[in-house]
Amino acid sequence: MSPTQNAWRTAELRARGIFTGRVLSNDSLCPEHYRIRIGLESFPPTRPGQFINIRCGGYRGRVPLLRRPFSLAGRRDASDGSVELDILYRVVGAGTAWLAGLETDAQIDLIGPLGNGFAIREDKPQAALVGGGTGIGPMIYLAEALAAAGRAVAAFAGARTASTMPLIEKQKETFAITTDDGSMGHAGMVHEAFSRWLDNEKPRPAELVVYACGPEAMMKAVADICTPDGIECQLAMERHMACGMGTCQGCAIKVKTDEPPGWMFKLVCKDGPVFDAEELVWE
């Protein structure tokens, strides 16, 4: 990590904290996915790829003991210093079921911002984004940041079927869409659509950065496409991140090292969640 990156990371750690937000909206995007918008009086600077930990309440007698991590899917800053954060989530358990039941003006307790975000390279004018399922959320935020930075962006979103595609109509115009069953967009896996784009467009590896978030098998496929051709590939990895700050040690991931046995553990919440594809040890 460069001195500039170290300074940036130090500033991030000083800025994070516990905040109380207000639900501005909580909309169903498809049968399984929701987008919640949280309003806060203020919030530290963030980057796509970072996340927050939310204290979720109980649902049908089940009360989650630990906070739940959610990647940022968007941010808007008002002139008075107030902030709106977007979270895209899938209902999978008691915590997310409780979240789906929150109504407008409900209070929400969160910690953030957490983790390291994606890096936008000044020397690489092209970007390709590959998102699957809830991993599409960080790609939405990143696409906005890349466009604001003047990068040429190609974006790909994949889901099992049309009923599980968590995009609104405007975003469907931005992303090239694939579904496993062909019920929306192109039939097939999202990494296959990305691979075809590389074959057709033939971008120069030295000018391109690939970003991905989604199921681990999808991200490994994207890494396997990029690495042999020397294309920089940044992946937002997912693990159970209970504390979000490296205290519980529950989100370990293997990365390569020159020292025996050739690998070591890092923490997804603290050292990631964004990693360079070349440094990961895939199991």
Image (tube, rainbow, N blue to C red):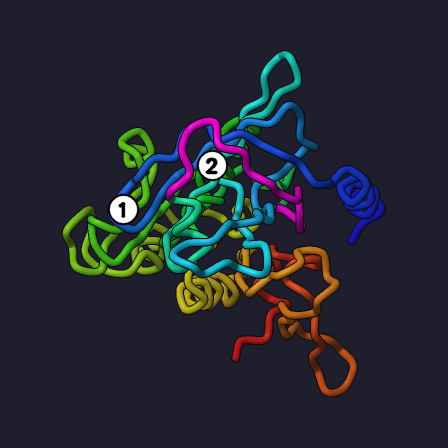
Q: Which residue does the numbered mark 1 point to in the structure image? A: 177
Amino acid at the residue labelled 1: Ile
| Depicted 223 relative to depicted 198: above or below | below
Residue 233 in view, yes or no: no
For marks 1 and 2, the one nearer the N-term is 2
Q: Give the residue furthest to the bottom.
A: 261
Residue 112 counted in the magenta span = yes
Residue sitting at x 67%, y 74%: 256
Please identify the quarter of the rendering in which residue 5 is found. Answer: top right
Placement of 116 over or under 146, stated as above or below: below
Where residue 69 appears, x then y in whole percent?
55, 53
Q: Mark 2 is on which residue type?
A: Ala
In the picture, measured across the screen, residue 35 lies left or right of residue 238, that is left
Q: Tell me if I can see residue 107 in this picture.
A: yes
Q: Nearer the viewer, residue 104 or 52?
A: 104
Q: Residues within 10 Å of mark 1 (few under 14, many from 20)?
A: many
**Which residues are the magenta region?**
101-118
Question: Which disc is residue 143 wearing?
Answer: 2
236 left or right, relative to 157: right
Q: What kind of element bears circle 2?
A: helix
Residue 117 point in image, percent of width and height: 63, 46
Q: Are marks 1 and 2 in contact (CB under 8 Å)?
A: no
